Each structure stands twice: as structure tokens, then as C-alpha cells.
Amino acid sequence: MNLFTIAWKSVRQRSLASGLTALSIALGVMLMVLVLVISGAIEQAFNQRSVGYDLIVGPKGSDLQLVLSSVYRVQPPIENLPYMYLTQLKKDKRITTAVPLAFGDVTEQGAFPIVGTTSEYFENDYAPGFSFSIRGERMQKLFDSIIGAEVARQNGWDIGSKFTIKHGGADSEKIHDEQFTVVAVLAPTGTANDRSVFLNLDGFYAIDGHEKPIDEIEKRLKDFYAGEPETLATALGQLEQVRVKQKSLPPAEGGGAGKLPPVTYDSPDAMKEVTAVFVKTRSAFDAINLQGDLKKGFQAMAVNPVRPIQRLMENVLGNIQKALVVLTAMIIAVSGVSIFVSIYNSMSDRRREIGIMRALGAQRTSVFAIIVAESAVLCLGGGMFGWLAGHGIAVLASPTISARTGLLLNPWSVNSWEFVLFPLLLVLAVLVGFLPAMTAYRTNVADALQG
């Protein structure tokens, strides 16, 4: 009979006390596993290159907000850029691809973010080396749409489904009259695309209420193109044509100029706006060069989509993860103390048992090893139960977490920290079992049998 068999029999004799002490270890390990699984999902979501582009061009402001709004769609956009600026970017010889995106609305059902874009968005990789897999057709008609896998799952939508959208955000009560039709469904990507609904950019412009007053557009264009008189003159000329057209319309109720027609694909470029532009350049040098040029100006900025997220991970999320790991480690350490107390307190009741073992020929070192083995059985057994429980809870909770946060959890993925968890539990077992084992080691056989 080996030491661990004897230790296991001893543990079973005190099943209630042993079970409670092992449970305390299990709870600590379970919490640590859940922290590691969730933090691993966050790290994967934010550290992977979730966009297969070199730069994101948007209005001047926070680079982090630009990335979070355009790539991850968890922040409101900063502002808009004139559509004419997109045309200028496409003419830049350093740029090979410039894909526009327009944000601002959500679906009435599920409040999923709306992304106005072109078919070119789906012709490029959504991440380096990963292309879209689409079931259905391209967006051809004005109110066609393509939906992400998570949108389809949660809303129960498929090809042919029709839906409406809300203006301005999830808290808005204004429902647009336009009805959109799903023409394709994306395969899961593990990115924010799974939680997005894509509209034909021309259809996005055609939504009633997306047009802005000409005076407001004119002021913004004058500010944006203050240093480009020729481009500004072209833009103002287009706006003047719209004014002339507006005057020819029937007067609005209560007098005044007629209501502007919705902005559509055949509207002048000066009337349109985009929120961000995903850009691919000919080389890494061109990307750095373009980013530097835009930084000097006042119109827009170009952001590497990886660096702001790396800062976020290092400065904020990384520290939170470390704090949670330290907290759960402290819980496990406290659980180890409970094992120490349980075994140490049992020593007085087991003096006769230890004395009999010694009288039958057991060496002091063997008694010492049995007590340490008991501690190891409790620590490692509780740890294994906690590890399985942690991943089991992650399996059950992953659909809900994915639905609420968009994080795609792999509940059975093993974090590198987990590889050292059980060796550390073994060290903890030796430490908490050492003093009770020394008590058993020093037990006097005659006194123990006499008692």
C-alpha cells in the first residue's frame, strides 16, 4: 500500500472536513480559471489584428475612440468626413484600397450596429490571411443588407428576412420607415463583424433623416477645405445646385423652402459624409508616410489599428487582469490555510493512530510523508475539481457572454497560467502540510499509545 493510498483512506475517514477544505481550494481555482478564460477572450479579441488594413482614416480626435468605433463598434464615432475626402484619398498613389464606412444607427431588434459600406469591404480580408465566407448574394439593390453570424443567430434572421432600424443609437425611439432585406449572412469571424448589420452605402444615404441642412454642410466644408480653395469651390458649387433644386420644390408646411430630398446615390458628393475609411497602402513605408502627412494637417488623422489597442491592453486591461489573478491567488492561499488548520487540528485526534503506525514499524519519514500526501490530495483534488468546474461554467455561460458582449469564448482553451497552476498547488500542499507533518514526525510512540 503506497503513501497516497494511505493518505486517501485517511482523508475519507474525515470526509466532511476534508470535503469542505478541498471545496475552498476548488472555489479559488474555479474563479481563477474563469478569470483566465474571460481575460484570454478579451486579449484575443483586442490583440488580434481584427482589421486587415494598414490604416484607419477618420476625423481628428482620439485614436483609440476611432479604432473602438470603427473596428470594434463599441464606441460612438468621433465625427464624419466629407465624402469628397474619400475621393481624394483614392487618388493618392500611396493608397491601393480605400473602403468607406458610415455609422450612426442600430437595428430595431437587438440594437446591433449599422454599418454603411460598399461591396469592396467584403472583397478584402477582415484580418490578415482571413477572408469573408458569405452565404447569399452581393448587395445590389438600395435597401439590401448583409448580416453577421451573431445577428442572424440572436434575431433568428436569414436570407429574405426584413427589418427596420432606429436612428442614432439603442436609446433612440425614432424608427426609420425604410425596410431592409437580408440578402446574405456572414460565417462567424470572431470579430465585431459578427455583431454588425451592413447596408449598401447608397441605401444608408437614402434613409430619411440622414440628410443635413445645407447651411450646416456648407460651414463644415468651409472649415474642412479652408486650405484647398479649388476643392472648396467645387463643393460649394454642388451645394448651390441643391439650393436651386430646393427652391423649385413645393413650399414646406408653414411656409419656407421646400423639404430637401433624401441624399441618394445620385446626390452630389458634397452632400454625403463617411465616418471612417479603411486604407491599404502599397508598403509599410507608405503607411508611415501617409500617417505623418495627415498628422501635420487639420483635416483628418490616420491611425494604425493595432497600436491604440496595445496601449489599452498594457495600461488598462492588462493591469485589471493581473489584479484579478492576484486576487484569486490570494483566495487559493487562504484556502490553503484552511487545509493547514484542518490537518493540524486533526493531529491531536490522530496521536494514537500515528503511535500504532510507528509501533507497527512505520518510519518517522513515512509518517511525515503520509501527512504531506494528505495535504497534496486535498490541494490537487480540490484544484482538479475547481479546474473542471471553471471550464464547465465557461461552457454553459459562453453563449450568454457572447450574446451580451460579442466576445467569442473558447471555454476549453488553456491559458499559459494554467500550466503552472497545479505545480504551484503542489508547492502550496507541501507548505501547508509541513508543520502538521512535523508534529506527526515528532510524536512519541509511548506517549501516543498511552494516551
Image (spheres, rainbow, N blue to C red):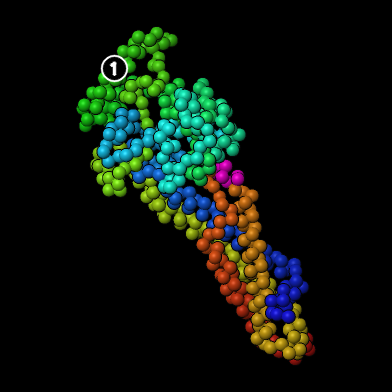
**At x 44% / y 50%, what residue is drawn?**
48
**Relative to the observer, which residue lies in front, 284 or 213?**
284
Q: Quadrant of residue 379?
A: bottom right
Q: Is residue 238 left or right of residue 362?
A: left
Q: Is residue 404 magenta?
A: yes
Q: Position of residue 135 (x, y in %)?
A: 53, 36
Q: Position of residue 374 (x, y in %)?
A: 68, 75
**Residue 18 spot, x, y in % from top left:** 71, 69
Residue located at (64% from left, 59% from top): 388
Q: Nearer the viewer, residue 252 or 94?
A: 94
> Residue at position x 35%, y 36% from top?
98
Is residue 105 in view?
Answer: no
Above or below, 315 relative to 26: above
* Placement of the C terminus among the 4 image quadrants: bottom right
Answer whether residue 373 is visible to the viewer in this image.
Answer: yes
Looking at the rendered structure, the kind of residue marked 1 is: Glu
Residue at the disc numbered 1: 240
Element at label 1: helix
Side of 142 relative to 303 (left or right):
right
- Compared with 343, 194 (above or below) is above
Q: Residue furthest right?
A: 450
Q: Quadrant of the N terminus?
A: bottom right
Residue range in magenta is: 399-405
Which sits in the foreground, 343 or 120? 120
Rendering quarter of residue 264:
top left
Q: What secondary structure predominates along the stretch shown in magenta? A: helix
Residue 252 lies, in percent from the top left, at 41, 11
Give neighbour class at mark 1: few <14, some 14-19, many 20+ (Cα, 10 Å): some
From what the image shows, is residue 179 above or below residue 303?
A: above
Q: With 434 as the anchor, is 415 left or right in this view? A: left
